[in-house]
Image: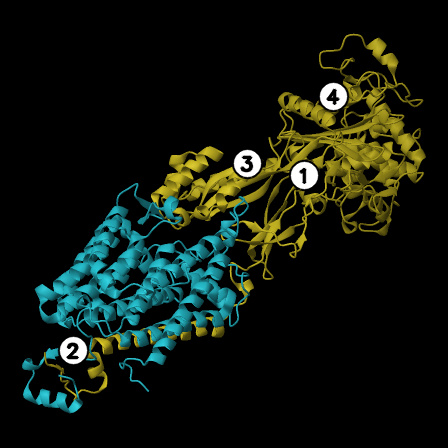
Amino acid sequence: MIVARRPTADGGTGVRALLDSARGRSVFLLALCCVLLLAVGVKLFWLQVMRQRSPESVAAWRTIAIDEEGRRGDLVDARGGIVATSVREVDLRVWTSGVAATDHRREQLAAELARIAGVDPQRTLRTLAKPGQWVLLAEGIRDPGVIAELRDLARRPAFRALELETRHVREHPRGGLFATQLGWVGWVADVAADGKPLATGNWRGVAGLEARCEAVLRPSGGARFVRRDGTQHDMLDPALAAVGARDGRAVHLTLDPLAQTIVDEQLAAAMEEFAPDWAQVLVLDPRTSDVLAIGQQPAPAAPMPDLKPLPRGASAAQRAAIEAENLRRYANHQMLAVHRVYPPGSSFKPLMLGLVLEQGKATPDDVVDCENGSHRFDRRPIRDTHPRGLLTVTEVLVESSNIGMTKLVLSLVPADAKKGAKAFQPVLDHLDRLGFGHKVGGFAGEENGMVPPLRSMDRVYSLASLSFGQQIQVTALQMATACSVIVNDGVWRAPRILDAIDDGAGGRIEIPPAPESERVVFSARTAAQLRGMCARVVDDGATRRWKPKGWSVGGKTGTAEHETDHSISTNSFWCFAPVAAPRFLVLAVLHHPRKGRYAADNAGKLASKVLGGLLERFEVPPDRPEELVSAGPKAEDGGAAPAGRRPLASAAPGVIASPAVGEGR
Amino acid sequence: MATPTTPPSRSEFDRSVFLLLASVLTLLALGVVMVFSATAVEASGTGTGGSPLRPLFTHGLKVLVGIGLLFAASRIDPALVARLAQPVWWLSLVLLALVLVPGIGVLINGSRRWLNTEQMIGFALQPSEIAKLALVLSLAAWVAEVKDVGADFRRTFLPGVVRVLLPAGLILLQTDFGTSLLLATLGFLLLLLAGARIHHLGLLAVLGLPVALLFLWLNPRTEYIFRRIGAFADHHFGEAAAATSGLPTQVDFAESALRVGGLTGVGLGAGRHKLFFLAEGENDFILSVIGEELGFLGTLSVLLLLALLLWSGRRLLLGIRHRFGFFVAAGVLIAIAIQALMNVFVAVHWAPVKGLPLPFVSSGGSSLTMLCVGIGLLLACARHADSTHPRLGPEEADEPLLPAADLPATALADADRAGVTR
C-alpha cells in the first residue's frame, strides 16, 4: 500500500500543518492545557500574593468576642425578700434563606423545634416559607435543658442560620407590691454628639428605684474570645484571654413589705370610702428617716407600664386616643410621693411654729389673741373656721387658728420689713433646712416643690400665708421628712430608701449618709415642745376618734382648699407614735375627697388606720395600756371614741373652752 | 532537538517515563498529606471519639492500591487491552445503570453516583470514573478499527458518538453534571483527534444541546446546577441569577482560604478553612486547602507537577506508533488535563462548582485508582510503542495516511521529495 502525506494549503508547514494530524492536534491540545494551567497559576499569584488577606479579616480565622452580659442586680426589701430580679431568656431567630434550600431541611427543622421547644411545626414551616428574612421562631425560652438542645441544633451545619439571642428579663416576685417605687428597665439608645439617638444602646433603669440604683444594679459587660469552626463550635484556645462579666450588685431597700401591705390595704379602703382623685400614704421610721412604705392610688398593677401599641394605619383620632390612654397609664406609674406637689395647709403649722419657739418669740404657754375668728392684717383679712379669743400657743395649734399662727409667725420679722427685705431670709433658710424647695429623695424626675423667693416675700401675704401652709407646694417625701425633725429631736435627716448593697462576697455594705444628709433645724427642747403640742392636737382634736388605742399619737391635719373652687381640697394628716419614742411617722394625702370636708374626716382616718396597723403588726409595746383596758368593744369606724372633741384639758387661764374644735384651713 | 511531533529517542523515552512517574508519585504523596490535613479534624468527629489518623490510613491505602494498579497496568500487552476494550465499555454501562437502582446505588448529597461497595472494598465505587477509562479504551479501539472516523457520518462517526453519549447520558441521569460534561468533552476531543469533521460535530451539537438543556430544565433534581450557575453569575456579574442565601458560599471560602495563604501559607496543618467552613476541602477544593497551608508556592507546585505530567506524557504519546495505543495515551492525558482544569478553574472561580476531584491529589478511591490504571496503560502502550498487532490498528503517522492512488501526481512527487516511504 502506498501512503503519502496529505498536502496542506500553506505548503505543509506551520500551525495548519500541525493541526492536520492527530499527533499535531494532540500536541496542540496538551500544550493548550499546560498554558491554561499556567494561566491559573497567574490567577493564583494575583489572589494569593497580590491580594493576600490577613487571617483576622476572614471568618474562618477571626477571633470572635462574645459579649457576656452579667445579670442585673436584685432589689431586696427590708425583710430580705427579692422584689425585682433578672431571669435569662432566649429567643430563637432564623435567617430563612439559610435553611430554605430544600423542603426536607425545612421539615427537619420544624420537627426538631417541635420536639425540643414545643413549637408548632406548621407555624415554623409557614415562617420559613418567606425567604430573605430574619424571623422569630421561639421566644422567652427559660429551661436550661431546652436552651442547651437549641444550641446544639444551631451548631449543625444544616442549621447555621439559626441564632440564639439571650436577654435578661426583669421579674417581680412580689407582683404589684412596691410597683410604684421600683420603676422599670427599658432600652435607652445612645445619643450621638448632635443629640440624635443611635441604633446602639443599653438596657437600663429608666424610672423609680431601677433608675436611681442604676450604677449599682447595672452589670458590667464582659467578653469571651473564641475561635469557631464552620459549624459554630467554639474551639479551645488557651492563648485567648477573657474578660469576665460582673453581675450587678443587689441593693437592699428600706421598704418593708408588711408596712407596704398595710398601706396598700388601707389606701384601697380609703379610695372606696372617700373616692378622692388620688391618695398617697408615706411611712417613715422617723429616727432614721428610712422610708418603710410608699403607697398611692390609683396604683399600677405592675412596675412596667402596659402601653397600648399604635396600630398600623390608625387614624389621627385613634392615634390621639391611644396616646392619651398611654399617657394616663404612664401617669399611674408616677411616684406621687416625689412627682406631685400639694399645698400642705395647716399640717405645715408645727414646722413654722418650731421656728417661733426656737427664736424665743413665744413659749407654748404664751397667750395669743385670736380675735374671735376674724382679723385684718393691714389690708388682708384672715379668718378662722372656728372663732376663738385668747388661746395659748399650744391651743393655737390644737385649734389650728390661722390668726394665732399669723400673729406668731409675723413676730419673726420686724413690723417695718419691706417686701423682699433680708429680714425674711431666716424664714426661708428655715424652710431650706427643712428640705423644702429642693429634691430630697434623689429620684429621677423628682419635684423640687415651690417656696416663695425672697424678692416676693412680704409680711401680710407671703409670710402670713406660710404660717398656715399656703403659698408653698411640697412633695409628700419633703413633708414627711420635715415632720420627722419634730420627732427626731430637731435633726433633719435625708430620707433613706437604699439601705445597703451586696459586697459581692455575701456581705453587705451599708450605704453611708450623704455629707449634707443631716442637719440641726431645732433644738431638742423645741422639738420636745412641738411633740407635746402635736400629741395635744391628736388627744384633744378631731382626729382623736381615729387614734389607735394603747399608744400616744402626735400629729397635725391640713385642709388646703383650691384657690378658686372651694369644693376641691387637698387634705393631709401626718402623725407619729408612740410620742415618747416614735417608731413610725405616717403621712396621708387625699386630693379632692368626695366624702368628709376636713382632713380629720378622711386623711386623719386613713393615716390613723395605717399607723394603728403598723403599731399592732410590728408589735410596738403600747405606751398607754390603760386605753386598751378602757376601750372595750371597738366602735364601728375602728375608733373607740365618738367623733368630736373633748374639752380642752389645759386651757389657759381665762380662756373659755369651746364646745368643739374644728380644723384650721 | 526533536520537533513537537517527533518520536522521542530511547534516552528521551526513559527520561519521560521518569518524569511522568515522578510527577504522579509526587502528586499522590502530596495528596496523602493534604487529605490527611483536610480531614483529620472531621475524622476525629469533633469530640465523638473518631481517630484523626483514619483518613491517613484509608487514603494511603487507596494510593498504595493505585500505585499497584499503575505498575500492574503498565505490564499489560496493549493488544489484550484492545481486545477487552469493548467488554469493559459494556461493563461500565451496566455499572452506570446499576447505580440508578435504589439499594444498589448509594444516595449521597442528593445524588446517586456510588455503588454500595463500602463493605466489600472499603470505599463506595463510582462507576463514572470507570466509565471515563472505558470510554477512552472503547473509542481508541473504534478509531483503530475504522482508521478515519470522519470518513462517513453514519458508519464511522455516529458509532463513535454513541460510545460517548450512552455513558454520558447515564451519568447525567445520576445528576452528576460535572462528570457527564467531562466525559462528553473527553469523547468529542478524542473524536476530533481521530479526524471527525467539524461540521459533523457541529450538527451533533445543534441536535444534542437542546435535548440536553431540555432534560436539565425538566429534571427537578438538576436544580442545583442552575443554582451553581446562578451563584457563579452573581459572583461575576453582580446580579443574582438564582436566590442566594446571603451566607458565604463554598467558593467564597475557597477564595478566602487561598488569599489567607499568601506566598508561603500558614503552615502545614494550620489551615482553618478546612474546619467545616470549606465543604469538600479534601476533594473538590483541595487546592484551596493547599493554598492556605502551603501558600502560592504550594499551589504553583501542584500546577507545575500537572503540567510536567502532561508534557512528559506527550513525549511518550509521540513515540507510540499504533493508533490504539496513541489514542489510549491521548485519552488518558486529555482526561487528566480536563479534570485538572475543571477542578482548578472552580477553585479560582473561573467556572461554576462542578464537584470534580483534583487528579491524584484529592481523596476519592475510584478516581484515583482509575487515573493510576490510565497512567499504567499509557506506560504499557509506550513500552509497546512499535507493536504491529492487528488489533492495535495501523501506524499513527505524523499526518493522515492516504492511499497513493487517491493522491494527485504532484502530491506524490512532493512525497517523494520529502522522503516518505512507499
Left or right, A631 with respect to A235, comes to: right
Quarter in which the N terminus of chain A is drawn:
bottom left
Residue that lies at the very extreme toward the bottom in this rendered image: B417
Residue A563 shows up from this direction: no
Which quadrant of the figure has residue A296? top right
Q: Which residue in the structure is indicated by mark 3?
A: A306
Q: Earlier in the sequence, mark 1 or mark 4?
A: 1
Q: Which residue in the structure is indicated by mark 2?
A: B400
Left or right, A59 with respect to A368, comes to: left
Chain A: drawing colour = yellow
* Kind of residue sitting beneath label 1: Arg
C-alpha gap between disc 1 and disc 4: 23 Å
Q: Which residue in the structure is indicated by mark 4?
A: A609
User: Mark 4, chain letter?
Assistant: A
- Callout 3: 10 Å neighbours few (<14), some, many (20+)? few
Query: Dots 2 and 3: beta carbons under 8 Å?
Result: no
* Kind of residue sitting beneath label 4: Lys
Which quadrant of the figure has residue A392? top right
Which of the two discs, 1 and 2, sits closer to the camera? 2
Chain B: drawing colour = cyan
The local secondary structure at tag 1 comes to loop
